[in-house]
Image (cartoon, rainbow, N blue to C red):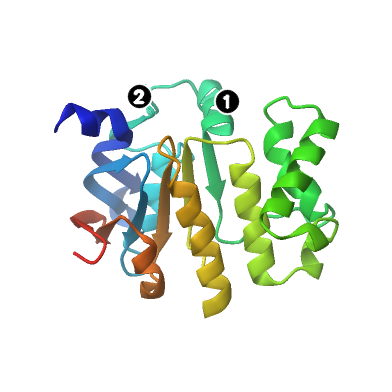
Amino acid sequence: MPSAAYSRLAIECRGLIKQFGEGPTRVLALRGINLSIFRGELTLIVGPSGCGKTTLLSVMTGILEPTKGQVDVLGRDLVHMPSRERSFFRAHDIGIVFQEFNLLPALTATENVCLSLVVVGCPRRNALIKAREFLAELGMSQEAEKLPWQLSSGQQQRVAIARALLHQPHVLACDEPTSALDHRAGEGVMQLLRDAAVDRNRAVVVVTHDPRIFRFADRIATVEDGCVVKVEPAGG
């Protein structure tokens, strides 16, 4: 691989195996996956339900530990990193958008967004100001003080993405970001993620089974039965 590609490398997975359970109930979710994710790109991980996409994303971001294999994120060995250090690293350098949004129902949109700064030590007052400003940049000034139940699904997803981006992570990982959205809302969310990937220092990786959003990707990795069977440029 050319040195220029190495300089853009954000995540490298080598021989990833993830097993759940033992004996006759054992499930091999990942079966020796090799995959590289690059800065300045939006990479889609696609495949049918149950193929291992979300498990792969969870291992790549340090939420799950692999049974075997190696995961390097931003040049750091995630597998052998102590759990406390891994949590600190994830809070500072990785933004995660979960499929169910995971917004706190008692907090406003602004308060939900500011959490990503508060957990890394930013004073709450400053975090609230930055969160409010960021929501304004996303065209959500009128929704900034609303509670999650007062927002549409598309608006809730944009709040979740804003929360994941506010601390300027080098890796943004999203699990099925358009699964609960109609076409128009899904397009808006993917454009936001596409814009985030333009930053040459950030890698955006999205798990999806929604073919409508393939056109937003730079590369598409196809997973089948816990294996990456191909990686190709979007439209390739």
x and y, in percent, of residue 34 in the image: 21, 43
Compute the Cα span from label 2 to label 1: 15 Å
Name which residue lies at 26% across and 59% down: 223
- Quadrant showing the C terminus: bottom left
Q: Quadrant of residue 100?
A: bottom right
Left or right: residue 166 compared with residue 20: right
Does residue 64 appear anywhere in the picture?
Answer: yes
Residue 36 position (above or below residue 233): above
Identify which amino acid the numbered label 2 is placed on: Gly
x and y, in percent, of residue 101 in the image: 63, 58
Name which residue lies at 85% across and 56% down: 145
- Residue beneath disc 1: 88
- Residue beneath disc 2: 75
Name which residue lies at 43% across and 22% down: 81
User: Label 2's element?
Assistant: loop
Pick the front one: 213 or 209: 213
Circle 2 packing at 10 Å, graded few (<14), some (14-19), many (20+), is few
